[in-house]
Structures are given as structure tokens and as C-alpha cells.
Image (spheres, grey):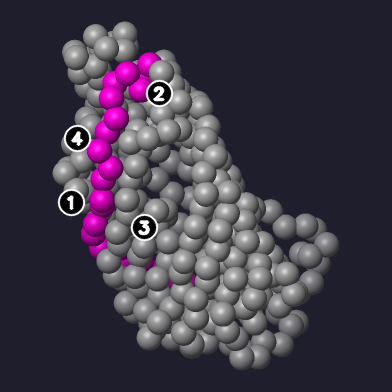
Amino acid sequence: MKNPIIFRRAVLYSLGLGLSSPLMAQEDPASVPVERSVFDGDYLTAGLGVAVGPSYEGSDDYTISPLPVILGSIGGIDFQPRGPGIALDFIPDKKDAKVDFIFGPVVRARFDRQNSIKDPVVRSLGKLDFAVEVGPFAGIQVNRVLNPYDSLTAQVDLRWDVAGAHDGMVVFPSLTYFTPLSRSVVTSLAVSGEYVDDDYADYYFSISPAGSAASGLPTFTATSGWKNVGATMLTAVDLDGDVTNGGWGLIFLGSYSRMLGDPKRSPVTSIRGSANQFFAAVGVGYTF
């Protein structure tokens, strides 16, 4: 029996989030013999999807955008997307290990309120610079929790802006349960949150006197705290019925998050937007 990492990679590197059909779930993955997988060595997944998400953090206007993703593993180093960005796991997963450790660098770009601001009042506050957040991420993964191929992963990103935009810090913890539903369908459910410092909160959610005069919104000073919590459902469906051999796969994604604290109370959210944030994507990926 192969390490369950082959199934987990299949979903992470096929770009998918969503729900699968009850018919597919009837097949017991533990009863399917697993032979050599495309994920056993170096591999690459390239995909392209279409995403629908808020115009900015806290917005109730939604925009459509392309969602390109490239990820995989080379020389035992896994690389995975960080929306938009990348995280590199330098600790190789061990075959049949009960516990795997995760550690490496992460880089994430943030274009919030840099473009695609649909609300004219928020747009009158002016465009913000794009941020580049850099730092480490670490975690622990427990394999074979409820079946031979599932896993439970806890990890956290710690990132600082190095591009001179918000100049702040973001802490991003997450807990993810992954399981195959059949040999062709894999899914995961993740819960996560973001904690931000004073600099981040002030940059994106405060309203200065000048901003108040330009927009008509009341002045507001945002400080550090939990920015949001949310959940993401992910599903990938292999089109030839065998997720372990690579090839083409369909992508489904759905997530919900709730703004908290000062980001929720900020006029850009409470007056011009909404604390309820939704995101969805669908696409196709190819693994080889």
C-alpha cells in the first residue's frame, strides 16, 4: 500500500474544491489496490480556472478573474500555490509515515484595492499599492486518521510585507482534513483565519480625514486583531477514473469567510460592503 500522500497531492495539485456526487462516494478507496503513482517522484500540475470573488476584502461586489496555477514536486521539495504566491515545503514526506512535518518559505502577493474596485465610493479613497508578503510556514500532518488514505494537517504561515505597501504582518493558521471518496474523486475541508497587526489593519481598513472628505465615509482607525475566519471545500475529479496516474482533472472550489473586528467595523465593509465573503472557482488541470 502506498503512502496516502499520493492522494493528497492529487487534490492539492489538481486545483480542485467543491462537492462530489453520492454515487462516486459509494466506492471504498481502501478496497482499490494502489500501484505506482505519478506522484511518487518529480511531477508538475498546470491548470487554469475561472474564479468569482469580492472586488476587495469586505466588498459586496464580485468580479470574475482567471485562476492560473502551477505546482508540483522537484527533488523532494513540494511547491504549492498561495493565492497568488507559492509555498515550498523543504521536508520530504516519508513513505508510510504516520506523521509528516512541514516547513519552508512562503511568498504571497496581495492586490487588494489595487485594481478592480467596483464601488465608486471606495474607489474615491484611492488605489492601494500591491504587497508582497514573505516569511516561513510550518505544520504537522497526521496520516491515516479514519481510513488508509486520509490526513489531518495543521499549519501556519507567518508573513511580512517587503514591498512597502502595508508594511505589516499576517498570521494565517489553517486546519485541513483530506480524504479520497473513490479512486477518481478526492476532497478536503479546511478551516482557517487571518490575524493582522496594526500596520495591515490601518492600511486597508482605516479612513483618514482626507479619505473621509473624498468619499463621504466617516473617519475610522483600525487596529490589530483577527481579520476573518472561514471554511473552504475542495474537490478534484480525475477524468479517466484514476487519480494516481495523472492526466486531466476537473477543478471545483467554494469558500466562505466572515470578517471580524475592525475590518468588519470599517466603513469600507460595514457601510459599503459586507462581512460575508464568498469565493468560487471552476477549472481544469493536467498532471504529468
Query: Which residue is under mark 3?
Result: 85
Query: Which residue is under mark 4?
Result: 198
Query: Which residue is under mark 1?
Result: 162
First in residue order: circle 2 vs circle 3 = 3
Query: Which residue is under mark 2?
Result: 269
First in residue order: circle 2 vs circle 1 = 1
First in residue order: circle 1 vs circle 4 = 1
How far apart marks 2 and 1 lie (CA) works out to 26 Å
- The label nearer to you, 2 versus 3, is 3
Q: Is 171 within the magenta?
A: no
How far apart marks 2 and 3 lie (CA) works out to 25 Å
How far apart marks 3 and 1 lie (CA) works out to 14 Å
Measuring 56% from the left and 80% from the top, which residue is drawn there? 288
Q: Are marks 3 and 4 in contact (CB under 8 Å)?
A: no
Give how far across and how far down residue 192 sits, in percent: 43, 49
Q: Quadrant of the N terminus?
A: bottom right
First in residue order: circle 3 vs circle 1 = 3
95 with respect to 130 (left or right): right
Task: Determine whether the residue tagged by mark 3 lies in a helix, strand or loop.
Answer: strand
